[in-house]
Image (cartoon, rainbow, N blue to C red):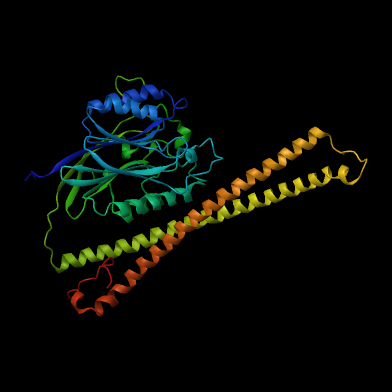
Amino acid sequence: MVNTDAVNVRVFSLNCWGIRYLSKHCSQRCNMIGDMLCKEEHDIVLLQEVWSEKDYLSLKKKLASCHPHSHYFKSGVIGSGLAIFSKHRIHDTFLYRYSLNGYPYMAHHGDWFGGKAVGMAILNIGNLTTNVYVTHLHAEYCREKDCYLPHRVVQAWELQQFIRHTSAGADVVIVGGDLNMHPQDLGNRLLRTYTGLRDSYLETAKFDGCEDGMTLIADNPFISKKELCPFEKGIRIDYILFKGSSKMDIHCDSMSTTKGSIPDHPFPYSDHEALTVELRLSPHSPTETGSDGQSKDQHCAAAKGAELVDILTEARTEVKVGLHCAERKRYTAARIGVMGLALLIMELAIAAVPCLALGAEQPFPRTSFYLLAALCFAILLTTFLLYIFYTMELKSLQGAEDQMRLAIGSLQEKLRGFPLVHAHNGQRKPPEGQEPSAFDIEE
């Protein structure tokens, strides 16, 4: 029987690769994306890497009739690149910028200048409060030697915290974006397990798209196969995640992706593939369960708690690796700075010789003297800035590690303490043979 109260929502997500003057055919592709979105009947459009506000304004003008409500999230030096377009009115927005986002001296990667963040928009679909999140995490440039892994793990940790703490009153939660993580990567498992978000590709009843849901494929003409090594066919790093609430159930009826080339167009929309999902929202109908059902639910909750402890422990280990690396870099910067200071003091002492010994001449040519002084000042300034940056990185890593430690301790206490709690609380004692829940609140 079809539920007449069900609401259908179509969600679109795409990393647009919109770096003006660097990305190939940027303006043409932006126009193609706008034309496509005008034809398709999406309720919510989530875009990443719209780095130019001019491109956003162009899309906003083109989509004014079909998506009258939009917001562009501004962050960092060149912006966050995040944008939301919606058929439904956007009532509130908020941007959270990740505390760690690569290194400023890695200019060829550019992540630090982008100000990676998560943008939130609160909108009403009918009478349902819907929290929509769009995000873009730090890229993985080398699978074997991923020096950005601790940063991406911290970003995933901050993302799940932000979603959990801001979506408590939402009926529906939708998250879309380029997570730059494979399905079984640590950050991905941390995000989905902690928040309860479900992956559209794994939940969909019908799928039409690239093999294994891949969103970065070798058949895309903008992709170099070297970028995909050791994955010859491609990887899945773009996602649309969702979850319902005690009030609403949510199901993914279908999902589709683009497949590289676009019919009647000379090139694809982007180097990433676009995702489209059709979600069905229906009122939650609670079902009565006996003691066996309750026991099974509580056992699953306990198993989930144990799994979450393992994931957090693994994440904390990666953060500690990042801590040790940042400490070494800060020590190196301090040591080079001291050497530069010593060289500057030595030069000043040599410069003082003519003043102290009357008639003595400057032993070095004036030009060489000034060049050496400029070099010393450059070393001091660079190492001073690096020392400050690495200190900030250390503080962020330490903060995340402390939060994870507290979370692990809380989960372990619940997993250990519940039998004792129920034993001393007659009113909450479960029926005979029923396992206590690992996530019930202790009194």
Name the quadrant containing residue 362: top right
Question: Who is closer to the viewer here, 286 or 101?
Answer: 101
**Image coords of residue 153 (percent x, y):** 43, 51
Q: Can the viewer see residue 129? A: yes
**Image coords of residue 386 (percent x, y):** 59, 47
Image check: 122 left or right of 1? right
Farthest left residue? 1
Question: Who is closer to the viewer here, 311 or 399?
Answer: 399
Name the quadrant containing residue 414: bottom left
**Image coords of residue 437 (percent x, y):** 25, 68
Question: Who is closer to the viewer here, 215 or 282?
Answer: 282
Image check: 292 left or right of 227? left
Q: Residue at x 72, y 42 (%)?
A: 376
> How many marks do you count on the picture?
0
Q: Can the viewer see residue 205? A: no
Q: Is residue 353 above or below residue 405?
A: above
**Image coords of residue 15 (percent x, y):** 36, 34
Q: Residue at x 45, y 49 (%)?
A: 99
Image check: 186 left or right of 397? left
Name the quadrant containing residue 400: bottom left
Q: Residue at x 38, y 27 (%)?
A: 54
Which quadrant, please, contains the C terminus?
Answer: bottom left
